[in-house]
Image (tube, rainbow, N blue to C red):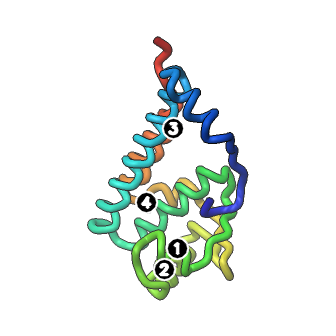
Amino acid sequence: MQMSGYGYRCRMDSAISEYSRYGRFHDLVLRYVQAQLIQTCQSVGCNSHHEIPQRLARWLLLCADRCESPTLNLTQEYLADLLGTRRTSVTIAAESLQHKGLIQYKRGRVVISDRVGLEKMACECYRIVRNHLENYLEVEQG
């Protein structure tokens, strides 16, 4: 896990057995893998085409979506790794977002103070990934 939170686990033999039944669990696993691949591909394209403030806005929104909180404990070094850039670039981008009133940032703690504004600042990559993640649990019952 990259952020604090919770997760689930089960024995590998149980997961393999359930997956091999080709039921709902099988379909959910495949949809989850597809969602992760889409996010990875979108991130690669985003990192090569969009400016750092847009990419930072995207990652902050995705992290907030996952932990269901506007408060994120993220260091500049960690954000730099996520964005594929230097820590100083994250500092400049975070200060820019803070001056616009979109976030509050201090010592590894980011608070999204204007989510609507941050969504406007983010590139279209955020909406593409978010929409896909919102729909990945929608598996047709056959």
Q: Residue 45 lies in what quarter of the image?
A: bottom left
**The disc labelled 4 sits on which kind of residue?**
Ala
Q: Position of residue 50 (x, y in %)?
A: 32, 67
Circle number at residue 122: 4
Which tag, 2 or 3, sits closer to the chain's start?
2
Question: Which of the pair 66/60 is nearer the observer?
Answer: 66
Pointer 1 residue:
79
29 above or below 80? above
Q: Nearer the viewer, residue 95 or 32?
A: 32
Residue at the spot of label 2:
90
The reply to whether the C-beta atoms of the residues labelled 4 and 1 are less than 8 Å apart is: no
What residue is rendered at 66% in x and 58% in y? Answer: 70
CA separation in Å, label 4 and label 1: 15 Å
Calculate the distance from the C-alpha at mark 4 to the C-alpha at mark 3.
Answer: 18 Å
2 or 1: mark nearer the eye: 1
Q: Residues within 10 Å of mark 2 (few under 14, many from 20)?
A: many
Label 4 vs label 2: CA separation? 15 Å
Q: Is residue 115 left or right of 136 when viewed as pictured?
A: right
Q: Mark 3 to mark 1: distance in Å?
A: 23 Å
